[in-house]
Image (spheres, rainbow, N blue to C red):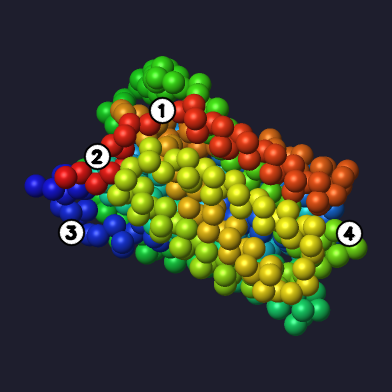
Amino acid sequence: MDKSAVQNGGDGARRSPWWWVPTLYFAEGLPYMAVMTISTVMYKCLGIGNTELAFFTAWLYLPWVIKPFWSPFVDIIRTKRWWVLMMQWLIAVSMASIAFALPASGFFQATLAVFWLMAFASATHDIAADGFYMLGLTDHQQSLFVGIRSLFYRISMIVGQGALVVLAAHVGASWAEPKAGWIAVFGILSAFFVAMAVYHSAVLPRPAQDSMREVKTMRGVFDEFVETFVAFFRKPHVWVAILFMLLYRLPEAQLVKMISPFMLDPVEKGGLGMTADEVGWAYGTVGVIGLMLGGIVGGLVASRNGLKRWLHPMAWSMSLTCLTFVYLAFVQPSAMWQIFVCVFVEQFGYGFGFTAYMLYLIYFSNGRFKTSHYSICTGFMALGMMLPGMAAGWIVDTFDYRSFFVWTMVCCVATIGVCYLIKVDAGFGKKKG
């Protein structure tokens, strides 16, 4: 019998991963996008300064940083499937709460508080969804679908930064009230997550390994919690792996916080002078195409030749995309086609290069506590995004956009350098036979 059938039980053996992997990771990306990027665009459009919005929204990474401290409980208590569905309902409530909080005079503080709750729910959803992915697919399927899951995860982020931003701009302009557009966006997102929770309750398989542990006492829960962390830090080359997790995305961690402010700021302030809906169209059209191609190509080549073969080319691809923003900052083109080409290159390079990062996290997490260990890995990933991102707005306000984007190019040395330190089995990710 096929290994995937054994893993998934009777239900999983009959249901193709195409039914649930794309939707699960699309749903995983949207709340992260709402917390980390839509919030940045929204606050910029509503008059919050670069330093404040970068600093406070960077703190929203914290739930992803500390999620390893509760990930063992997701492993121990109930099933990954149950956690996925419950968190989707909680995210739906959080989205609705943002819509209700926006009209208030103190909307900045109120929405930040709800974003904080949403961030915890989203981080918990990530733990459960990633664990469910590893339990429900064979090693080869994981390698094959890592490009698909990254693709739909990133498409959800592009939809957020593309279609939803365009919608917010048009509704706000129609009502002559900028907040009206964002209220509509978060209302739609709330309804979407209600639909996702209902859909996934029907289509998610029930892998045989996704069962509740036989831990009957609090002492048993605590002992297994401690054992999870001890096992992680006893893995071979763990400190080199952590360095990779922290530094591979160093340029992106800073870049992602300032892309929208850079595009929205007027030309005289060093920006591109674009409107919110133009930014949305740029990332919602050619950005999607570039991302799709990069993610699909990355998954296919890794599945064919393995992670080790493609690790360094993917790191270079991830790094060189920063050049597009150096060009945009120095030239400040008014022609939209030039901006679209740069967005395409940046998104293709990111989609292709990020495949290596996700595969390495899966590779390093393999073992008895794969769900919790993957969560610890993504916690270090979030820390690597949080700390550099906090300073991005200050760098721009203290210097300028040109200096900032040149600095991100310097940081690419870290991305490429850490790839020479890690060890990967030659056969990992290859199709067997």
Query: What whole-number distance in Å separates the C-alpha atoms at marks 1 and 4?
Result: 45 Å
Q: Earlier in the sequence, mark 2 or mark 4?
A: 2
Q: Which residue is mark 2?
A: 209
Query: What whole-number distance in Å separates the C-alpha atoms at marks 2 and 3?
Result: 16 Å
Residue 210 makes an appearance in the image: no
Mark 3 is surrounded, within 10 Å at the Cα level, by few (under 14), some (14 to 19) or many (20 or more) other residues, namely few
Q: Which residue is at the front of the view, 26 or 140?
A: 140
Question: Mark 4: which secondary structure?
Answer: helix
Question: Mark 2: which secondary structure?
Answer: loop
Mark 2 is surrounded, within 10 Å at the Cα level, by few (under 14), some (14 to 19) or many (20 or more) other residues, namely some
Residue at point 22%, 53% (across, down): 12
Q: Which residue is mark 3?
A: 14
Foreground tag (3 vs 1): 1
Tell me the amino acid under the disc marked 4. Answer: Lys
Q: Earlier in the sequence, mark 2 or mark 1?
A: 2
Q: Which residue is mark 1?
A: 423
Q: Which residue is mark 4?
A: 269
Residue at point 42%, 53% (across, down): 298
In the picture, measured across the screen, residue 37 lies left or right of residue 367, that is: right
